[in-house]
Amino acid sequence: MNKKYEAVIGLEVHAQLLTETKAFCSCSTKFGNPPNTNVCPVCLGHPGVLPVFNKKVAEFTVRMGIATNCTINEHSIFARKNYFYPDLPKGYQISQYEEPICENGFITISTKDGSQKQIRLKRIHMEEDAGKSIHDRNNETLVDVNRCGVPLIEIVTEPDLNSGEEASAYLNKIHQLVRYLEICDGNMEEGSFRCDANISIRPIGSTELGTKTEVKNMNSFKNVEKAINVEIERQINLVEDGEKVVQQTLLWNADLNDVFPMRSKEEAHDYRYFPEPDLFPIVITKEWYEEIIKQIPELPETRKNRFTQEYNLPEYDAEILTQSKYLADYYESLLKFTKDSKSASNWIMGDVLKTLNEKKIEIQDFSISPNRLGSLINLISDGTISGKIAKDIFPIMLEENKEPLEIIKERNLFQITDETKLEKIINDIIANNPSELKQYFEGKEKVFGFFIGQIMKMTQGKANPKSVNEILRKILAQLKEN
Ligand code: ADP
Ligand code: MG
Ligand code: ZN
């Protein structure tokens, strides 16, 4: 980036809440049902109907507010946001405008230089989603209103972010939190976690805000980061060419790696907000607040710190293990079956996460139980198998529904620790490789590794590495003396 400018970014995240029914009626929120079947007179906006507020929506929102250090307003109100669009049969969206439920929070992110930075949250409010227009038919637009009335929270930051990377770090944290709190599934592809970015630039040292643009339509963290960086570049080039940034809404095009103005017709906003006359104000009583606090699990930051202390793990491990609540839960279940907290961590960070990535599944769908993985780890520490053999057993456990010990017996994978047996194998290998032996005596220490490799090959990885090392050293020393 051009060193003369600083980028200023504020994010608006929409997270779909995991309630079973919609915000103001009893229709299902289930994704993927046949179009226009999750509907009723209320969410279709028929005349004369009345919305009934789903209490869960407030509870979920307050959970997020507490987790992000917000003030929870005892009294908040709904507002009508009026606009016309084919996927909005009511002609308005119920949202919050003045007096939102949560305000003035913050979360902490780690920046590229390793320091911690606070990002202030302006507000978190509740609102209902609109339906979906599907434009990809030839000359036809289809409308699916199943999503009308599905509850959302909108989380709005102050303009505290200064790069695409920081925006991505912030999003990761928010994403992690909504999943820990079990209020949103975080699925960006299905649109249950969406982000709009407000972007401006200003000369370094200036404290005034520049004219912002709003970029929409990014459906992955990667795309948010890319889109922001592309837009920052575009604004800098404009200003450098003596032109002005025009306030407008831009759409990210992932195929073309660029942003394009939204048709201006779609942009003319005058929402004429006014207080929703059909709903009472939301009052979060002290009792209700106390009840909601109890629904909040141990949060990632606290859990991470506890992991480093209680299980003696490096910060790095604790960070990865607490990425998701379910991964952290898996780790702690695993520790019910093995005492070796660091090995357990290594297995999860290595083979387990690799498997989840390859199979594109979540830990909840992982086929090896903590009980069995624990047994595998214990079989290494008690010397039954070598660590190397364990790596071969793991994929078998993925495929076959068997205890590790059963697999070891079936395939005779027990570790060879018998010294006489190992000595014989090692002597044979040395005898068969006289030129390597000569090189070793001439001082080529690397040849030691060659011998180890040969021994492991000969024993199909079953030799106890520690014993092999000791015996080989001993035999070579003896040979050298003679
Ligand atoms: P609007 O009324 O256009 O939606 P808001 O004041 O509600 O604007 O702010 C929306 C988001 O844009 C917030 O995240 C805010 O921090 C951010 N924002 C506001 N002004 C700027 C600016 N000049 N540059 C970058 N972000 C901004
Ligand atoms: Mg806005
Ligand atoms: Zn309905």
Image (cartoon, rainbow, N blue to C red):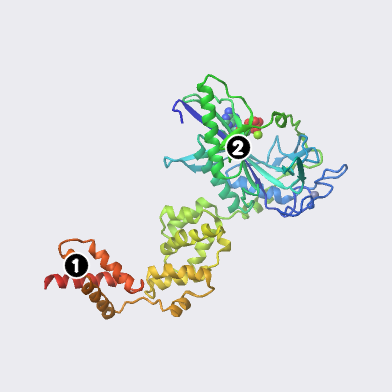
Asked whether mark 2 lies closer than 8 Å to ligand 1, one says: no
Q: Is residue 387 left or right of residue 255?
A: left
Q: Is residue 177 visible?
A: yes
- Seen from the viewer's position, the closer of residues 279 and 218 is 218
Mark 1 or mark 2, whichever is nearer to me: 1
Amino acid tagged 1: Ser
Quarter residue 342 falls in:
bottom left
**Residue 77 visible in the snapshot:** no
Quarter of the image for the C terminus: give it. bottom left
Residue 52 in percent (x, y) is at: 80, 48
Separation of marks 1 and 2 at Cα, in angstroms? 64 Å
| Location of mark 2 (residue) | 252
Q: Look at the numbered discs 1 and 2 and tell me whether their residues touch, using CB distance below 8 Å.
A: no
| Location of residue 466 (image quadrant) | bottom left
User: Is 404 above or below relative to 349?
Assistant: below
Residue 229 image position (x, y, % from top left): 52, 35
What type is the residue that disc 2 sits on?
A: Trp
Residue tagged by mark 1?
435
Q: Residue furthest left?
A: 482
- Badge 2 element: strand
Q: Earlier in the sequence, mark 1 or mark 2?
A: 2
User: Measuring 57% from the left and 32% from the top, which residue is drawn there?
Assistant: 199
Residue 212 in the image: x percent, y percent? 59, 28
How many residues crowd mark 2 within 10 Å: few (<14), some (14–19), many (20+)? many
SS for callout 1: helix
